[in-house]
């Protein structure tokens, strides 16, 4: 229950953060007349697309002033855009300027919002010129403290006549201008839907990761910790790609968010190699794959820090190329391991890397086909959330399996401790009795030796019976059903008489009357099994019958069977004790009344009866006595 409340609390925190950001946007767009003039001028609720108005100038020397850049964008040789998602330059290319103008009649009562819908674009700047005056560097809304958003936003002031806008892009991203001019209310509706979608997508992986973490405090499995670390890195990467990281953490700039996201990808790749080596046991099962993974880990350890020190602008390209090859190699390894040893865990492991490879394919298709930037970023975000979900799910399964195995081991260890601790109690009494009988035998007269030998045989049989139980339970699970036991035809009177003679000395010591009526029936039974069962029944009856009591060993014909019954007028059992008496380690009396016994006698009777397909019967009244027995087939 505690783990569930933690998960719910995390989801509530995420939703509250999204709600706060949405409320901030709604507060900014609370004026009902905001859209009136714009809608009246345009005849619709949305502004026209901005990309056909853009003119692009390339600053090959990175030396343009805003005025020079404006002149180049308005010149005849300025580059127009063929479509909204056109790629103008490869990563780390020269600065590109885009210029356009907005007339006063397009504005509403308080201005328009300009958005660059590229959450990972961390080197973008805007200059404005109002009504032909000088150019001003215009901060985005996060820098000016007006709010945090998924992507860079600028609040454009309303001019008297015309507003000129310059947008400069440079950095490690490919150069695209997914610019959009919107009224604040239209943007708020779009932003709100995006945040709700992201919250819904991230809720599942976050809950799985937190649930897995809450189950792991007492486990020391490096495989599981690496899996959870990978899932958390995936959530962090997805938050960076989508812009959610900057939205929930306004103090974090986009450049710092890019560094954090890139570092998370690096940790993810390195952790995935270590996890694969442990999870797939490559050192033992795949020596060649183990060597390849070692080489891959060292490459990641060396290349990324070297790139940061020597050429940091190429870090994202290294992560892109290296991550694509890494995912492909891991998918091949996971698929091969699953083919060799199919299991649910390996299916999840292979599925995880298949998702990663598919997202990499989508990204490369986006680069070649110039798909919308938000499309590929959305795919990468969903991929990250799906990866985190698969990792969290797999980690939860592993944690639950390990906890079940640990609980089983603890249960077995506790049971074994009980066996060892109780062995001295159950063995001490018969061994001590054998020692006393042996000493008495040396001094006994010839007529008493037979009874002493019989008593020694009884004590020896008790030791043997206990060792049989100990051997049975030490296997940690019931043994396989044995072959059909050997049976013999025997006169029941002879079998019962031998047992009564064997227990008569013990009954005399306890001052209990032990007798049996003569039975002339012949039965087909396993003699050794029936003797063990009757010894346990007689031992229990003599144990719980006080001095002066009576124990009767008799038989009764019923339903085609001969029931062998042991009856006493001892302490008896209540209804609950009668239900539990056939369970292992059940003692029906405190140690001072029932002796130091482990409570395996009636359990042995029940197990032998089931093994030889004999029904059992029990009737007991507390304070008056017990009737217990089993049925054997008649000849």
Image (cartoon, rainbow, N blue to C red):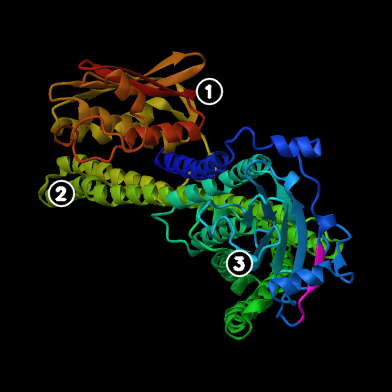
Occupied quadrant, residue 163: bottom right
Do labels 3 and 1 touch, CB within 8 Å? Answer: no
Task: Name the element at disc 3.
Answer: helix
Q: Residue at x 30, y 51 (%)?
A: 417
Q: Earlier in the sequence, mark 3 or mark 1?
A: 3
Q: CA distance from mark 3 to mark 2?
A: 84 Å
Q: Residue at x 72, y 70 (%)?
A: 329
- Tell which of 580 and 128 is nearer to you: 128
* Side (left or right) of 445 relative to 144: left
Residue 89 visible: no
Q: Earlier in the sequence, mark 2 or mark 1?
A: 2
Q: Which residue is mark 3?
A: 265
Does residue 577 lie above or below 34 as drawn? above
Q: Which residue is mark 2?
A: 441
- Image quarter where the N terminus lies is top left
Task: Name the element at disc 1.
Answer: loop
Can you give x and y, in whole percent of width and height, for residue 448 in the image? 15, 40
Residue depth check, mark 3 versus mark 1: number of the one nearer the observer: 3
Q: Which mark is residue 635?
A: 1
Q: CA distance from mark 3 to mark 1?
A: 80 Å
Do labels 3 and 2 touch, CB within 8 Å? Answer: no
Can you give x and y, in whole percent of width and height, for residue 225 in the image? 49, 61
Q: Main secondary structure of the magenta part?
A: strand
Occupied quadrant, residue 184: top right
Q: Which residues are magenta?
A: 55-60
Task: Name the element at disc 2.
Answer: helix
Can you give x and y, in whole percent of width and height, for residue 455 in the image? 22, 41
């Amino acid at each position: 229950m505690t783990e569930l409340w933690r998960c719910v609390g995390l989801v509530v925190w995420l939703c509250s953060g999204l709600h706060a950001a949405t409320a901030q946007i709604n507060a900014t767009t609370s004026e009902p007349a905001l859209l009136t003039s714009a809608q009246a001028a345009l005849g619709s609720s949305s502004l026209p697309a901005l990309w056909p108005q853009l003119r692009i100038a390339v600053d090959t020397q990175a030396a343009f002033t805003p005025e020079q850049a404006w002149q180049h964008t308005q010149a005849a040789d300025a580059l127009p855009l063929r479509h909204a998602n056109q790629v103008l330059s490869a990563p780390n290319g020269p600065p590109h300027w885009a210029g356009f103008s907005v007339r006063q009649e397009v504005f509403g009562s308080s201005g328009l919002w300009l958005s660059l819908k590229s959450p990972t674009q961390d080197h973008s700047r805007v200059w404005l010129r109002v009504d032909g005056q000088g150019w001003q560097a215009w901060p985005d809304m996060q820098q000016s403290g007006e709010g945090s958003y998924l992507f860079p936003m600028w609040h454009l002031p309303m001019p008297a006549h015309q507003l000129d806008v310059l947008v400069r892009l440079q950095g490690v991203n490919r150069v695209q201008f997914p610019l959009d001019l919107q009224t604040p209310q239209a943007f708020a509706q779009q932003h709100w839907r995006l945040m709700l979608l992201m919250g819904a997508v991230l809720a599942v992986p976050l809950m799985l990761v937190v649930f897995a973490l809450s189950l792991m405090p007492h486990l020391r499995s490096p495989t599981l910790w690496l899996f959870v670390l990978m899932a958390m890195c995936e959530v962090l990467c997805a938050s960076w790609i989508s812009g959610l990281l900057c939205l929930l953490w306004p103090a974090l700039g986009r450049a710092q968010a890019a560094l954090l996201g890139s570092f998370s990808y690096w940790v993810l790749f390195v952790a995935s190699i270590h996890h694969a080596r442990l999870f797939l046991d490559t050192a033992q099962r795949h020596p060649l794959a183990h060597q390849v993974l070692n080489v891959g880990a060292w490459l990641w350890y060396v290349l990324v820090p070297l790139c940061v020190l020597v050429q940091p602008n190429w870090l994202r390209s290294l992560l892109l190329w290296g991550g694509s090859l890494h995912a492909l190699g891991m998918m091949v390894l996971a698929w091969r391991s699953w083919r060799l040893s199919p299991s649910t865990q390996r299916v999840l492991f292979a599925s995880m890397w298949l998702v990663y490879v598919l997202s990499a394919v989508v990204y490369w298709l986006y680069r070649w086909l110039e798909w919308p930037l938000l499309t590929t970023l959305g795919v990468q975000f969903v991929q990250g959330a799906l990866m985190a979900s698969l990792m969290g799910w797999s980690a939860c399964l592993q944690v639950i399996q390990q906890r079940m195995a640990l609980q089983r081991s603890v249960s077995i260890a506790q049971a074994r401790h009980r066996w060892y601790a109780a062995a001295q109690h159950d063995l001490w009494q018969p061994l001590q009795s054998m020692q006393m009988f042996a000493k008495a035998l040396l001094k006994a007269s010839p007529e008493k030796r037979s009874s002493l030998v019989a008593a020694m045989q009884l004590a020896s049989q008790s030791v043997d019976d206990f060792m049989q139980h100990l051997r049975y339970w030490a296997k940690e699970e019931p043994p396989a059903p044995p072959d059909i036991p050997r049976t013999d035809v025997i006169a029941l009177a002879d079998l019962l008489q031998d047992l009564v003679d064997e227990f008569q000395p013990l009954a005399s010591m306890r001052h209990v009357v032990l007798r049996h009526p003569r039975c002339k029936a012949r039965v087909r039974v396993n003699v050794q099994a029936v003797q063990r069962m009757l010894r346990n029944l007689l031992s229990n009856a003599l144990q719980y019958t006080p001095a002066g009591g009576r124990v009767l060993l008799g038989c009764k014909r019923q339903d085609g069977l001969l029931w062998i019954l042991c009856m006493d007028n001892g302490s008896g059992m209540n209804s609950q004790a009668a239900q539990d008496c056939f369970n292992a380690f059940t003692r029906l009396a405190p140690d001072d009344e029932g002796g130091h016994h482990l409570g395996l006698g009636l359990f042995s009777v029940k197990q032998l009866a089931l093994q030889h397909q004999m029904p059992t019967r029990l009737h007991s009244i507390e304070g008056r006595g017990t009737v217990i027995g089993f049925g054997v087939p008649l000849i």
